[in-house]
Amino acid sequence: MRWANPVEVVLSASNIPLATTILVTATPQSGTKATATNTGLTGTLESSTASLNLTLTQTNVLTATASFPLVASLGTGPVYAAGPVPSLAEGEEVTHVRVAATYGGGSTITYITASGIEYPMR
C-alpha cells in the first residue's frame, strides 16, 4: 500500500483546555515509531480541533496523548489523590491529567500528582 506523505492527521477533542498540544505516536508493525506534536487545540472547550502531519512508511496504530494541568479556575478546586495503599500519595494534590486515545478505541485518563505518581482512572 502506498500513500502520499506526509499524512495529515486531524484531531478533535472535547473538555480539554484550548492551546493544549497533542502528541501523536504512530506505531508500525515493525520499525521505528514516528511522533508529531500539533501547535495546540483551537475552538471551544466543548469542541476543539487540531491537525498535524506524519510521515508513514507502512500501516500504523495511531495514539494521541494530551497532558495538561488541573486549574482551579474551572470551578472544581483542587483534587487530592487517594492511593490504593494509604501511604501512597494519600491526600497529595493532583496537578496534571493525561488523556490518551487510540484510533477507533476509547480514551484512558491518568491523574498525576505533584510528586509524579500516576493513577490510571478505572
Image (tube, helix red, strand yellow):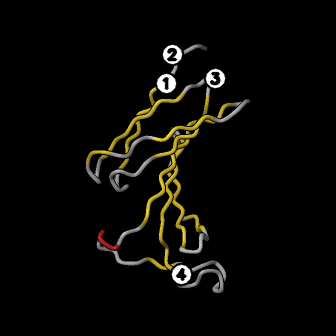
Q: Secondary structure at mark 3?
A: loop
Q: Quadrant of residue 27?
A: top right
Assign a secondary structure to mark 2.
loop
The spot of residue 97 in percent (x, y) is 48, 63
Q: Amino acid at mark 4?
A: Glu
Per the model, the C-alpha gap separating discs 1 and 3 is 11 Å
Of the residues shown, which amino acid type is indicated by label 3? Gln
Q: Residue furthest top?
A: 2
Question: Residue at 65% of width from left, 36% of height from top?
Answer: 33
Which label number is shown at residue 4? Answer: 2
Separation (CA) of disc 1 from disc 2 = 7 Å
Which numbered marker is on residue 92?
A: 4
Mark 2 is surrounded, within 10 Å at the Cα level, by few (under 14), some (14 to 19) or many (20 or more) other residues, namely few
**Is any atom of residue 122 visible in this view?**
no
**Circles 3, 4 touching at the beta carbon (< 8 Å):** no
Q: Is residue 104 left or right of residue 44?
A: right
Using the rendered image of the protein, determine whether residue 121 is visible from the camera's viewpoint: yes
Q: Is residue 38 left or right of residue 118?
A: left
- Earlier residue among tags 2 and 4: 2
Query: Split into 4 quadrants, where in the image is the C terminus?
Result: bottom right
Residue ID at (34%, 73%):
72
| Residue sitting at x 41%, y 68% | 70
Q: Is 87 drawn above or below residue 53 in the view shown?
A: below
Dot 1 crowding, Cα within 10 Å, few <14, some 14–19, many 20+? few
Q: Quadrant of the N terminus?
A: top right
Provide the residue designation for mark 3.
58
Q: Specify few, some or many for label 3: CA neighbours under 10 Å numbering under 14, 14-19, or 20 or more.
A: some
Residue 33: mark in rendering: none
Indicate the secondary structure of the residue bearing disc 1: strand
Q: Which badge, 3 or 4, comes first in the chain's sequence?
A: 3
Q: CA distance from mark 3 to mark 2?
A: 11 Å
